[in-house]
Amino acid sequence: MMWTDDPIRDWDRYCEEQDAILETYPKCDHCGERITDVVYEIGNELFCGDCINELFARDAEEMRGL
């Protein structure tokens, strides 16, 4: 990206470019947010780390004896 003498416009253009890049990343099928790090694929669904924890994580203490 080339910088000009207009830092505000440069910043706006930079943000637009970053938004366009973000649109190329997959979406979590649960929350709809773009996933920019680790994608968990279960069956034919994609999940972000936060949703994996929300949906599937359990406290080991609660599961003792199972």
Image (tube, grey):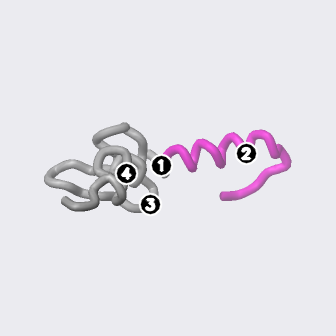
Q: Which residue corresponds to mark 1?
A: 22
User: How far separated are the C-alphas under marks 4 and 2?
Assistant: 35 Å
- Which marked residue is nearer to the observer: mark 2 or mark 1? 1
* Residue type highlighted by circle 2: Trp
Q: Residue at x 85, y 48 (%)?
A: 5
User: How far separated are the C-alphas under marks 2 and 1?
Assistant: 16 Å
Q: Which residue corresponds to mark 3?
A: 37
The prevailing secondary structure element of the residues shown in magenta is helix
Location of residue 3 (image quadrant): bottom right
Q: Which residue corresponds to mark 4?
A: 53
User: How far separated are the C-alphas under marks 1 and 4?
Assistant: 23 Å
Label whose residue precedes the other's in the sequence (3 or 2): 2
Tag 2, which secondary structure?
Answer: helix
- Counting from the top left corner in percent of width and height, residue 11 is at 73, 45
- Counting from the top left corner in percent of width and height, residue 8 is at 79, 40
Tag 3, which secondary structure?
Answer: loop
- Which marked residue is nearer to the observer: mark 1 or mark 4? 4
Tag 4, which secondary structure?
Answer: helix
Label whose residue precedes the other's in the sequence (4 or 2): 2
Specify whether residue 9 is painted magenta. yes
Q: Which numbered tag is attached to residue 11?
A: 2
